[in-house]
Image (cartoon, rainbow, N blue to C red):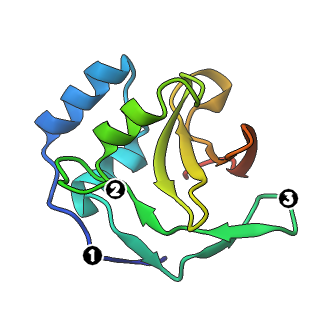
Amino acid sequence: MAKINDAGSVISVDAIEVLESRLESSLPRSYREFLMNYGGGYPEPDCYIFSGEKDGSDVQRFYGLNRSDSYDLVKILKAFNDRIPKELMPIARDSGGNQICIGLRGVYREKIYFGIMSNRLVMMVSSLN
């Protein structure tokens, strides 16, 4: 398990429910728990390999709620509204600015995707369990 550094403020159930209402979808349970426990931050170690691939990347930062900086999840959702499918939600970024997304609906649900800036998605993890 990665250590989370520079965790954000604890996020309340009420704040998560407001986010879920905005998304018109519930968050996967494990991501919901991550937000409530850490509120964002950066992992150590920060590198990973894509599922079934030889390539990988890093996680520069997990987004949080109620942040005053550029890692605020609501600001990120607005910025990427037209560029990421509605079934996915950005939850982190790599050092190249690529988005790491979690699936919210349908066949995408609970899977983690790496959204390359050229609009190509690569599945990183097939399950959060």
Q: Is residue 107 left or right of residue 39?
A: right
x, y percent for residue 80: 49, 34
* Mark 1 neighbour density, 10 Å: few (under 14) some (14–19) many (20 or more): few
Looking at the rendered structure, the secondary structure element under dot 1 is loop
Looking at the rendered structure, the secondary structure element under dot 2 is helix
Looking at the rendered structure, the secondary structure element under dot 3 is loop
Separation of residues labelled 2 and 1 (CA atoms)? 14 Å
Q: Is residue 36 left or right of residue 4?
A: left
Residue 34: mark: 2
The residue sitting at 55% across, 44% down in the picture is 101
Location of residue 50 by image quarter: bottom right
Q: Which sits in the foreground, 79 or 89?
A: 79
Separation of residues labelled 3 and 2 (CA atoms)? 25 Å
The residue under label 3 is: 52
Separation of residues labelled 3 and 1 (CA atoms)? 30 Å
From the viewer's perspective, is residue 85 above or below residue 56? above
Q: Amino acid at mark 1?
A: Asp
The residue sitting at 56% across, 49% down in the picture is 99
x, y percent for residue 35: 29, 52
Please report whichever mark, 3 or 2, sits nearer to the chain's N-terminal start: 2
Please report whichever mark, 3 or 1, sits nearer to the chain's N-terminal start: 1
Q: Amino acid at mark 3?
A: Gly
